[in-house]
Image (spheres, helix red, strand yellow):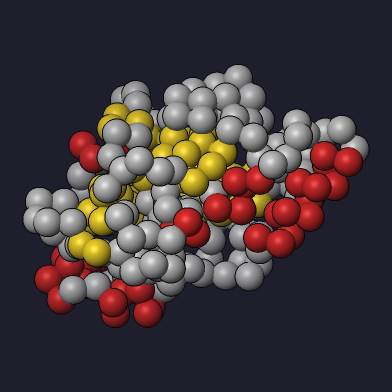
Amino acid sequence: MRGGMADFYYGSEDGGAADAARLPGSAPILGYASGTFIDTPAGARPVEAIVAGDRVETLDHGGMAVRWVHTETLDLRRARIEARPVLIQAGAFGPGRPARDLVVGPQHRILVGALGQIDGAFGGQAFATARALTRLPRIRPMFGRDAIRWVHIFLDRHEVVCANGLYAETLSLCPAGIAALRPFRRGRLVQAFAPGPVPIGPLARDSLGTEDVWAELAHRRSLGGLAKVA
């Protein structure tokens, strides 16, 4: 749905310390895999090393403070293909985009339409889910892992950050997603924004539906503007 909010995640609320949670076969998940480097005003840092109060570099508003960090470790052994992590190989969009392999959740949104990420497509800058982009070469569902640790960073608003050299989203929350958190996690989130409410705002860019993404990729391929689409 264009401009829609994704529901929140399923999995462990323990920061990855306990046994991995079992992943429902079709659970929508997003986030950055542990080991991803996020650009900050002081240079790129591993996402798992970022804590509340640290600043990350955003495309629209420069350095912004991280208000809350959520981690979850998910068991992938029974995951259906649509729920598997997506591997975006180095250079999938062109030189330095990304600079190194990037692993994100299938519903994690990637900036497209500009900045070296399918320039000129989609009528300008927009978000496409990683899963929708798996029809491009060098972007595919990832196998070979029994579990994965996701890290999500939440700012004062939904933003675009640079992850391993690729522009992608920070965490956005919907009311149902907040309600789905375990009580102590929800309490920490609420405390991070007290005395004000947890921000539920618009996405930083319009979010394209999967079929819209596929249609645009096929169109650009027919014009010779893309490499062969799988």
- Can residue 126 be spotted in the picture? yes
Above-or-below relation of 114 to 27: above
Residue 191, visible in the rendered structure: no
x then y, percent, for residue 58: 46, 40
Q: Please give left or right for residue 65 compared with residue 204 in the image.
A: left
45 relative position to 92: left or right: left
**What residue is shown at x 54% (from left), y 42% (from top)?**
140
> For this rendering, which residue is in front, 50 or 63?
50
**Residue 177 is drawn in which quadrant?**
bottom left
Estimate the x, y position of residue 218 in percent, counting from the top left: 80, 47
What is the residue that sits farthest to the right in this orientation?
A: 223
User: Which x, y percent locates residue 97?
Assistant: 56, 28
Question: Residue 214 occupies which quadrant of the picture?
Answer: bottom right
> Which residue does the image show at 42% across and 48% down from the upper left?
85
Residue depicted at x 44% and y 43%? 142
Would residue 134 be found to the left or right of residue 106 on screen? right
Q: Residue at x 38, y 51 (%)?
A: 31
